[in-house]
Amino acid sequence: MTSVVFEREIAPVLRNPLGLVFTVAQPLVFLLLFGPLLGDVPGTGWQWFVPGILVMTGLFATAGAGWGIQAELMGGSMERILVAPVSRASILAGKTLKEGFSLLAQAVLIIVVAIPLGFQLYPLQVLAGLALLAVFGIGLGSLAIALAILTRKQPETFWGAHQFLLFPLVLLSGVLLPVENGPGWLATAARLNPLTYLVEAERALFAGEFLDTSVLYGAIGAVVTAAVGLTVGARAMRNAAL
């Protein structure tokens, strides 16, 4: 039944693929206007910057999963879905798979744009990085769904909480600038940020490194995020009509 939910969710995206292009407008602005400024910053470059942009895209793109649930809850369509002969775990899986598909499509577009700018493509490592990003995105999308259900009676709270939680994670992960060049307290805070390990794993893979220890830590973090997200999301989905 997961495939049925996925087909229902992905159909509007396939009918209007330009929507995916517009969703990557902000990441492309960062890529095109901010990326060239890093040429004189030690330890950076396109192999360093592109993976960070992809992770940032995944963080903010998965908000769409929560927004979609809230729209369905407010419009009443979610109630019809919940009474259908489909398990709520399948509903959650189908919705998060759609977010994973959209995230991968956006990532591929960003990579294609980055190649003429000087980004060097390592196909196998990039595919591994995209798989890692998709696993993480599924977990984060599930958490966004859980947050949307929790705040369904106060829709504005969802966006406030979402932005409040994500911006510190993004800035402390060193997505845009290397935090190790900052003060000691900032580097310590970055080590406590789980997103930092995903960013480091993606950068190692996009630089052509499969055996770097950061890849292992990033993979563990992505799998744990997916497991926690799916567990919390499934529980929230079961309580959606309460």
Image (cartoon, rainbow, N blue to C red):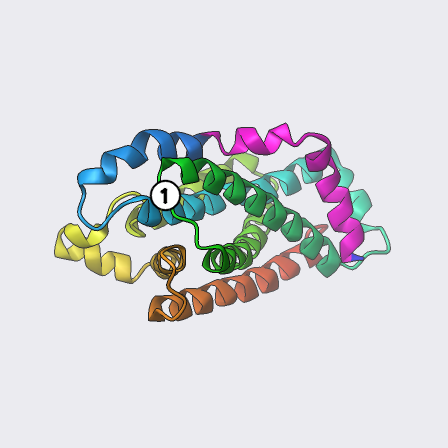
Residue 235 rendering spot, x and y as whole percentages: 64, 61
SS class, disc 1 = helix
Q: Is residue 182 above or below residue 112?
A: below
Residue 135 rendering spot, x and y as whole percentages: 55, 59
On the question of residue 216 being in view, the answer is: yes
Q: In which quarter of the image is residue 199?
A: bottom left
Residue 206 rendering spot, x and y as whole percentages: 40, 55
The residue sitting at the left extreme is 183
Task: Work out whether residue 224 or residue 52 is closer to the camera in this orientation and state it.
Answer: 52
Amino acid at the residue labelled 1: Phe
Q: Which residue is drawn at 75% across and 37% down?
A: 76
Task: Work out whether residue 67 or residue 55 is closer to the camera in this orientation and state it.
Answer: 55
Check residue 138 for magenta coloring: no
Classed neighbour count for the residue bearing mark 1: other residues with Cα under 10 Å, few (<14), some (14–19), many (≥20): some
Check residue 15 for magenta coloring: yes
Q: Is residue 31 above or below residue 183?
A: above
Q: Residue at x 33, y 44 (%)?
A: 46
Q: Is residue 79 above or below residue 127?
A: above
Q: For the stretch drawn in magenta, what is the main secondary structure?
A: helix
Q: Which residue is drawn at 46% across and 59% down?
A: 125
Dividing the image into 4 quarters, which one contains the N terminus?
bottom right
Q: Is residue 73 above or below residue 48?
A: above
On the question of residue 151 being in view, the answer is: no
Task: Work out whether residue 236 or residue 26 is closer to the camera in this orientation and state it.
Answer: 26
Q: How many labels does the image show?
A: 1
Task: Work out whether residue 12 or residue 234 is closer to the camera in this orientation and state it.
Answer: 12
Q: Name the residue under label 1.
A: 167
Residue 181 rendering spot, x and y as whole percentages: 15, 51
| Residue span colored magenta | 2-25
